[in-house]
Amino acid sequence: MGLLRFPGGTIAPQALTGDAVLDRYLVDLDAKLHGIAALRLRTLAEIKDTLLERKEQALASGKSALDAAESAVREIGDAEEFAAPQRAELRKLALQRGLPFGLFMALFQYAAMSLHHHIAWWPMLPIFVAIYAATGATFGIATAYFQAFGPPGNERVLSNDPSAYLVTERSHAGTVLLTFYFFGSGLVMVLGGLKIVSSFARIVFWVLRPSSQNVPFAQALAIGFGLISVALGVLLWNLLRRYRVDPAGFSIEGLGPVRRIEWGAVKEIAPLGKRFRWAPRIWKRISVITFVDTAGREQRMLVSPSMSNADRFLLELREHVARS
Amino acid sequence: MSSEKTDGQVLKGLLDTLVLGVLAEEDDYGFGILQKLAERAGDSLALKEATLYPLLHRMESRGFLECYWRPGQRGTDRKYYRITDDGHAHLSERLVEWKKVASILETVVLERRRPENVKKGRK
């Protein structure tokens, strides 16, 4: 078990084939992979498909079931050769997200605390900053796991809408919590920096008093980081959507009214990176959908790939755009 | 260094170009790509999934490929790969580079090893 492997995780049942030889290989591979079960399932699903196909070919050539399975395992290669690159990629992702998150959280909390503890030295401040830096780093590492949330094939047809044959949604509780955390605490910091409400700590106890902070730098820091947090919260808010697909089009359910878009109204689907070459690579995987609304205006919306059934939803969109 | 090891190193450098070349024709899944490469290159390219899949994931993270899942024939989903615009651009660059390499090899070594040139005593 490695540092980046979720404790106690066992192989997902849907990763197994029912063949003892193939399953022994998949269990061995699963034990070598890191990340949560959903993330490991993505790698296992691909290897499982290949193993079954190799076994079928061997059976078709006249081998016995046992020989066919052993031949499939032999030809596919050592499980460690698949697992080592996956672990390296996850470590890289965890570092790429953990460090910036940790730094942001440390500065964020420093800015929040500076509202009621002056920028000048406060003995306990380094300890609190270190705690929040560790919290932020944990957030970052957690997002490295959850980037693959939603194993393939988890279609959920809503029982109260039998016409919807595909639902795409971000149902992960972590995203909802993160959204409210950034949005809420950012708002408090901005208001605290503007001296409209009392400091961050006091607001928790519902005591509203004008802030006594008179250091302009501390106020500016709080307002700056507060605005960044509100922006992050707004960005995440936009991704808290559900797309319900039916033969004529799809509906977007979010925090506002339900929007309906027919397939014919969709004009283009392109990766975000096509428009913004400066964007980080992970953002480039977000798709930008251009469509015409009921008032005839061209609008755009973002679809994140890390939602359940996002692959199929985007495939449907591409096929309909190609047809039109 | 044995000739087998040398050939392996050269072919490893060519793999990304070969895979992009296959996917430039049509989308495909991992094993399908492997089978096409085996059909076209034969035994000279003994490629295993353990080499191909990490390469596919690396190219995906570099933006040359994107993947999607489609329902498979056995009730399980199958992961397909599609070449992106960046992938097409990278493939074009690599093909230009390999043609240049082939041309240099031809001019500097192969032409001089032709029997008619050896007989003429060219150095």
Image (cartoon, grey):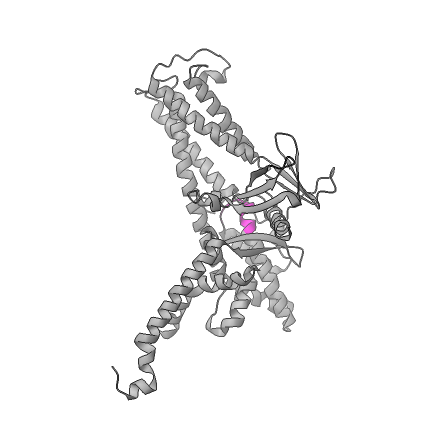
Give the left or right position of residue A204, taking residue A221 as reference. right
> Residue pushed farthest top?
A209
The location of residue A301, given as percent across then percent down, is 56, 39
Taking the image as drawn, is residue A306 in sight?
no
Taking the image as drawn, is residue B17 in sight?
yes
- Compare residues A179 and A277 and report the one nearer the observer: A277
> Which residue is found at the position 40% from the left and 64% from the top?
B96
- Compare residues A44 and A16 and report the one nearer the observer: A44
The location of residue A212, given as percent across then percent down, is 39, 12
Classified by dominant secondary structure, the portion drawn in magenta counts as: helix
> Which residue is found at the position 46% from the left and 15% from the top?
A202
Q: Which residues are magenta?
A: A34-42
State which quarter of the image contains the N terminus of chain B: bottom left
Residue A225: image quadrant is top left
> Residue pushed farthest front?
A296
The location of residue A254, given as percent across then percent down, is 62, 33
Give the left or right position of residue A318, taking residue A87 as reference. right
> Which residue is found at the position 42% from the left and 39% from the top?
A98
A240 vs A121: above or below: below
Residue A237: image quadrant is top right
B51 vs A247: above or below: below
A211 vs A22: above or below: above
The location of residue A78, given as percent across then percent down, is 49, 61
The verdict on residue A286 being magenta is no
| Label total for image | 0
- Compare residues A52 and A16 and report the one nearer the observer: A52
Give the left or right position of residue A315, taking residue B114 as reference. right
State which quarter of the image contains the C terminus of chain B: bottom left
> Which residue is found at the position 54% from the left and 67% from the top?
B36
Residue B58: image quadrant is bottom left
